């Protein structure tokens, strides 16, 4: 059994090339969009950075959530490839830093020609003379709250991501069958789920994404973004597991384990659709102008292509392709669907974020794709480095025997 | 179905049961069924049972539910009794999705439950022969169907070598039945 992962030169070069593309795109973006003449170009520059950094932070944080949820449920099925979510979770801090920088630059420095913040209108417009509704929401929607919640959420996520990995590595050095660390992880998992419920599942998406259109609100918005990031986060773990298996690692992972991950990709695609539709249907039915304005732009306006593509990619394709048992146990279909799902939810976040600042002037062009590639490069580079640092098999994990016998 | 003769072996340990099942299959005897007090992982594979097609039936029941709901609601609200609800179009698909979903689940669930009962030959009021009263308590019971090529004495002797704690021969109805079943007749049948 090959339990040590050495980064193949090709993977390293690919990731570095992707990062280079990202950096070049960022420079190009600064030169053409940020230094451009129109407010829309400047807004596009920031909105795309915001979109990708939010998306990648949320989907990598899912790995921490999965570890915590499975540890708390005392599940063994994850142990066979535990190092993958650990490695992804331990690198959340990179995306957290990028996201913090982007968010704070947007909130504190970006203003358009009229002195209005083009992304978060509530930063500048929440005054009695300017926007009465936003003034009424100022108790929550203000820069101080924003900074506090952002720093607390991202800091705690980054901390727990690294903590879970270091505890898991400490278990390797502990005496055989010692349960001290196991119960420590168990208790910390409960704490993390509490933190996660108050950040990712409520306040963080309100502040980072929903407040882009601050007049509109939806009470299940955070659940909806959670479903979106959870299914893409599971797909991300699946991609790494398939990659490592193709490299000859992760000998313990059988089709039964893959089947479990496949079930998550399938089931949570349906869960996402349930929330997506619940949000849409209630507002369609009550038909109140302040609510339907959100969907007017997306469903009937310039974003209708993305709106329907979103539904087809994120619901129709998973339900048709991943429904049968053999397709969830086939390396090709799960890899293909994992990439499709990640792309689909990237589009989902795109249509959450872009209509506010850009209106009808949206693009998926060199800049959007280049920045996305840059983030993918950072992810591959960082995660593969972490994976190579330790044995891929948690030899001393007390649930190792159980995970070997796992049947889906 | 029908009244048949079975050699019945009871085991008191999973670790004995698995090799026994493999040995019986290798010797070419036909396993009628294995009764266990709890779900034993991997036993279906050891017995060589093929994967159930119940989920395909479930899919078809679900599609029936979906089409029933969409068809019936759209017929009512567009042609039979169109009513203007708050200015919504008559063909108001989003409003029907919850009901469509519920009917899909209902059809799939009820249909699959009934199909499951049929496949396992269980139903309220239906009787089945119990090979050993302790098969739902602490014994793993294997029943092997006997025919003219598998003499009783040979099979029971063989089963004793597999580690069974108890071996006997029973004449039983292999399927299900309603009401009373007179056990007199099959015993005579077995003797003759």
Image: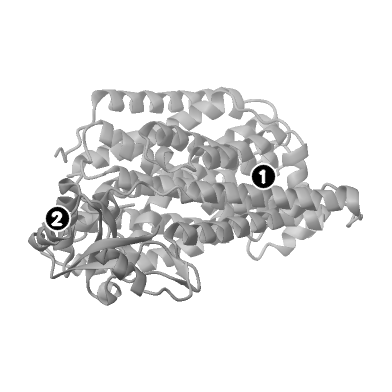
Question: Would residue B10 be found to the left or right of residue A148 on screen?
Answer: left
Where residue A288 sits, quadrant-wise, is bottom right
Q: What x and y, as percent, mark residue A402?
A: 22, 58
Q: Residues within 10 Å of mark 2 (few under 14, many from 20)?
A: some
Q: What element does badge 2 sit on?
A: helix
Chain for numbered disc 2: B
Q: Residue at x 67, y 49 (%)?
A: B66
The residue nearer to you, when weighing A386 against A152, is: A386
In the picture, the quarter occupied by the N terminus of chain A is top left
Position above or below: A95 against A281:
above
Question: Would residue A8 be found to the left or right of residue B74 on screen?
Answer: left
Position above or below: A99 against A168:
above
The residue nearer to you, when weighing B132 against A361, is: B132
The residue nearer to you, when weighing A174 against B45, is: B45
Q: What x and y, as percent, mark residue A67?
A: 34, 56
Q: Measure the alpha-carbon separation of dots 1 and 2.
A: 73 Å
Question: Would residue B7 be found to the left or right of residue A129 on screen?
Answer: left
Position above or below: B158 against B169:
above
Do the residues at discs 1 and 2 belong to one chain? no
Q: Dot 1 corresponds to which residue?
A: A117
Chain for numbered disc 1: A
Where residue A302 sits, quadrant-wise, is top right
Q: What x and y, as percent, mark residue A99?
A: 48, 45
Q: Dot 2 corresponds to which residue?
A: B19
Q: Residues within 10 Å of mark 1 (few under 14, many from 20)?
A: many
**Closer to viewer: mark 1 or mark 2:** 2
């Amino acid at each position: 059994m090959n339990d040590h992962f050495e980064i193949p030169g090709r993977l390293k070069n690919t990731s570095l090339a992707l990062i280079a593309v990202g950096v070049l795109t960022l420079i190009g973006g600064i030169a053409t969009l940020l230094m451009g003449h129109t407010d829309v170009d400047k807004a596009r520059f920031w909105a795309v950075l915001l979109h990708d950094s939010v998306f990648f932070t949320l989907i990598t944080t899912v790995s921490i959530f999965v570890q915590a949820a499975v540890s708390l449920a005392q599940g063994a099925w994850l142990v066979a490839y535990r190092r993958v979510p650990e490695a992804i979770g331990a690198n959340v801090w990179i995306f957290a830093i990028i996201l913090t920088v982007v968010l704070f630059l947007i909130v504190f420095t970006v203003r358009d020609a009229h002195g209005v913040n083009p992304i978060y209108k509530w930063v500048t417009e929440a005054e009695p003379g300017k926007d009465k509704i936003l003034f009424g929401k100022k108790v929550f929607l203000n820069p101080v709250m924003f900074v506090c919640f952002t720093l607390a959420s991202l800091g705690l996520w980054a901390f727990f991501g690294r903590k879970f990995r270091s505890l898991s590595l400490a278990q390797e050095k502990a005496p055989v069958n010692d349960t001290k660390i196991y119960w420590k992880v168990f208790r910390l998992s409960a704490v993390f789920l509490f933190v996660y419920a108050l950040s990712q599942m409520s306040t963080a998406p309100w502040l980072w994404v929903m407040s882009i259109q601050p007049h509109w609100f939806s009470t299940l918005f955070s659940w909806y973004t959670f479903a979106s990031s959870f299914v893409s986060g599971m797909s991300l773990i699946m991609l790494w597991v398939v990659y490592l298996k193709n490299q000859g690692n992760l000998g313990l992972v059988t089709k039964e384990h893959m089947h479990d991950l496949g079930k998550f990709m399938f089931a949570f695609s349906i869960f996402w659709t349930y929330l997506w539709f619940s949000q849409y249907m209630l507002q369609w039915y009550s038909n109140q102008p302040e609510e339907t304005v959100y969907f007017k732009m997306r469903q009937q306006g310039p974003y209708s292509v993305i709106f329907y593509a979103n539904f087809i990619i994120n619901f129709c394709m998973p339900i048709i392709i991943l429904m049968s048992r053999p397709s969830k146990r086939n390396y090709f279909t799960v890899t293909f669907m994992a990439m499709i799902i990640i792309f689909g939810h990237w589009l989902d976040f795109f249509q959450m974020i872009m209509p506010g600042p850009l209106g009808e002037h949206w693009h998926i062009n060199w800049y959007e794709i280049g920045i996305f590639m840059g983030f993918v490069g950072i992810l591959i580079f960082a995660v593969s480095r972490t994976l190579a640092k330790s044995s891929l098999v948690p030899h001393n994990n007390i649930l190792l025997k159980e995970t070997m016998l796992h049947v889906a | 179905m029908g009244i048949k003769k079975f050699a019945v072996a009871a085991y008191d340990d999973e670790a004995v049961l698995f090799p026994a099942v493999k040995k019986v299959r290798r010797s070419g005897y036909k396993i009628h069924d294995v009764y266990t007090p709890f779900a034993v992982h991997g036993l279906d594979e050891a017995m060589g049972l093929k994967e159930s097609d119940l989920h395909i039936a479930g899919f078809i029941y679900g599609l029936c539910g979906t089409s029933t709901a969409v068809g019936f609601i759209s017929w009512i609200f567009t042609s039979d009794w169109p009513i203007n609800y708050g200015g919504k179009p008559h063909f108001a698909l989003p409003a029907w999705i919850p009901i469509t979903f519920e009917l899909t689940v209902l059809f799939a669930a009820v249909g699959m439950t009934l199909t499951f009962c049929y496949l396992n030959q269980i139903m309220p009021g239906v009787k089945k022969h119990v090979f050993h009263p302790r098969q739902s308590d602490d014994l793993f019971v294997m029943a092997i169907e006997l025919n003219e090529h598998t003499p009783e004495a040979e099979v029971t002797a063989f089963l004793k070598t597999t580690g069974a704690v108890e071996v006997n021969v029973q004449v039983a109805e292999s399927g299900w039945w309603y009401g009373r079943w007179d056990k007199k007749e099959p015993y005579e049948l077995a003797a003759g």
